[in-house]
Each structure stands twice: as structure tokens, then as C-alpha cells.
Image: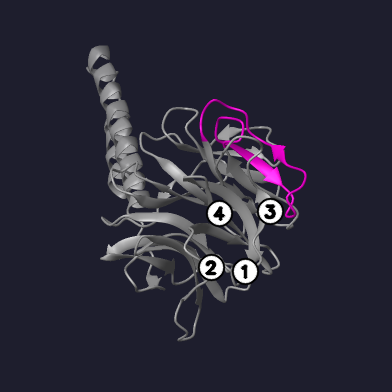
Amino acid sequence: MREDCKLRIANCKLKIGEPGASATGVSPQNSRLKSCLTLTIIAICIFQFSIFNLQSLSAVEPPPLTRLTSDGHFKQRPAWSPDGRQLLYTQHRAGKINLVLLNIGDATPPQVITKGDLPEYDAVWSPDGRRLALTHVKQSGTQGNVDVYTAATDGTDLKLIGGDSGKLSHEESAAWSPDGKRIAFTSTSQGNQEIYLVDPDGSNRQRLTNDPAIDAHPAWSPDGKRIAFATNRWGDFEIAVMDADGSNVTRLTDSRGLDDYPAWSPNGRTIAFATHRDGNFEIYTIAPDGTRPINVTQDPALDNFPAWTPDGRLAFVSNRDGGFEVYAVVSGR
């Protein structure tokens, strides 16, 4: 408690507790009045102390950042290779949506690894760094067909693992399990967008969620026991978590704005997500039980698509310098 509050309470107690206060002419009414005054001052001090603490929490300085890209084109879903040496991201440029690979720490220009003109986006690395899981749009009649594939890290050797099962459907948002044995993704194959699991060879497809709402953007916990995801089953999009078998769905956020794109930190202690609960897109972090929300970015720009480097640094896409670029926190938090 702040010193001014302590002094005020002590002062008041001293006056109320003066010898003979009630025995030397002070009426019971005045004594009760002074007691009420003391309680009021205590309440005010507790309130001031609480506000002071809340202000201190919200006034956390934004961390220093390093800018990793500089072409100005819109980007989404950055993903680091397990060894931290390469950054993969989706780039929108000249009417095309491509996957781009950037070597970290050297002067090699970013390389487009998408082959052909059909869109590819939202790629993630396998835990051993040998394959990618990605969304590929192929032509189906007069419209695009969105499916999940695996590929070599240079974009070749596309293999379908999550596609239509009957009528045309959309499969996307792949997320590789930490042990490399399963891939989570979303699908509309049964009418509503739900979260599914599949083996990396496309076998053993399993539906995890079953709700009339939209479930999107699954993200594995580092121990592989839980999956965070975004859902609008409570109205606005919120962040939820479930066990890896689809059970025990738990709501983590409760805001009036959109909360989306959860990303679990490598140590498992934090979940980052994008939100516009403050009227502007920012990157927040929370504990895995939904407590301790922190606005990390605190910038008037649009900050979106959080990700983590293998060494535990938060990264995201932002237009704070004009174009949409990938930024990373300089040191781990």
C-alpha cells in the first residue's frame, strides 16, 4: 500500500483511539461517525492502491523490435524453422498469394517457393524441419478448391493430406503436432467449419470439434496435450483451448472485440493472440488458463498474426512503418 494511504489511516486511527475519546464527552454518535470516516478513508486508499496497480500493469513498456522484412507487401502467418535459421511467410503481391522463404542473418534475397500461379499460404514446419504443411488452392471447375498439403521445404513434392470427402469443401490452417505424428486443420467437409486431425500421410482423419459455431486456427501446446483455437461459439471470436482429443473445451478470453490467431510460446507458459478489443488490432498475451492479459504491442498501427521464434521471442506482422512487415522482439520475454 502506498505510504500516503498508510499515513492517512494511521492518523485517523490515532484520533479515534485517543484516550478518553468516548468517556470524556464524545457522544456515541460522534464516535460512530469517526469510525465510519476511518472505514471510508481505508476504502478510498484500497481503491487508489488498486487503480495504481492496474495503471502499472497497463503501462508496461512495449518491447524493442527488430524488423525482418522490407518489401512493403501484405504478409500473414510467419513461421520459423525449428532451428531458427529460416522464416517462412505468406506474401500477397501483384494479385498472387505466395509462400516466401527468408534466410535469417544473411544477405540472401527472400525466395518465393510457390510453384506456378495458384495460391499457397499459411505454411508451417514439421518438428524435424524436413517438410511443410500448407494450404494450396487448386482449380476445381470454375472455382478454387482449398486443401491442405504437405511439401518439401523448397515447395516441391506436394502431397494432399486434407481434401474433399464428397462435395467441395475448404481445408486450411494446418498445425503440426510437436511429436510430428498428427496435423490439425480446419474443414467444412461436413457443412460447418470444424477442427480435424490427420496423419502426415493423409490417413486416420479424426473430427475434434462439433459445434454450430465456427472453429478456426488451431495451435498446439508444446507438450502436445492441448490445442488452442479461435471460435465464435460465444458470440464474438474468442480464444479457447481443448484437450488434444477434442474434450474439455475451455473459454480463455471474454472481450467485446475479435480475438484470433492463437500462438503458444515454446515454453508453454504463454499464448499470444491478435485482438481489437481496444479498438485497434494489437498483440496480447495471456496465461494458458486465460489470466494475466497483457497488451504487448501498444501501437496505433495494425499488429496481427502473432508467432514465436524457437528461442521464445514474440513476432508478428505490422504496418507501423508503412508497409506490412514481419517484426520480432529483440530478446525473449
Closer to viewer: mark 2 or mark 3: 2
Percent across and percent down for residue 156 are 62, 69
Q: CA distance from mark 3 to mark 1?
A: 22 Å
Query: Disc 3 vs disc 4: which is toward the camera?
Result: 4
| Residue 55, position as x, y percentages in the image | 31, 48
Mark identifier at residue 156:
1
Question: Which type of secondary structure does the marked residue at label 4 adopt?
Answer: strand
Q: Which residue is mark 2?
A: 115
Q: Which sits earlier in the primary sequence, circle 2 or circle 3? A: 2
193 falls in the magenta region: yes
Contact? badges 3 and 1 (CB < 8 Å): no
- Alpha carbons under labels 1 and 2: distance apart: 7 Å
| Count of marks, rendered view | 4
Image x and y of residue 88, in percent: 52, 67
Kind of residue at disc 1: Thr
Is tag 3's residue or tag 1's residue first in the polypeptide sequence? Answer: 1
Is residue 325 on the magenta stretch? no
Q: In the drawing, what numbered circle is on residue 177?
A: 3
Q: Main secondary structure of the magenta part?
A: loop
Q: Is residue 272 left or right of residue 266?
A: left
Q: Are marks 3 and 4 in contact (CB under 8 Å)?
A: no
Q: Residues within 10 Å of mark 1 (few under 14, many from 20)?
A: few
Residue segment shown in magenta:
188-214
Q: Nearer the viewer, mark 4 or mark 2?
A: 2
Report which quarter residue 254 is drawn in.
top left
Closer to us: mark 3 or mark 1? Answer: 1
Q: Which residue is mark 4?
A: 135
Among numbered discs 3 and 4, the one appearing first in the sequence? 4
Separation of residues labelled 1 and 4 (CA atoms): 14 Å
Q: Estimate how packed mark 4 is, as few (under 14), some (14 to 19) or many (20 or more) residues with alpha carbons within 10 Å.
A: many
The part of the image, by quadrant, that contains residue 168 is top right
Q: Residue flagged by tag 3: what amino acid is it?
A: Ser
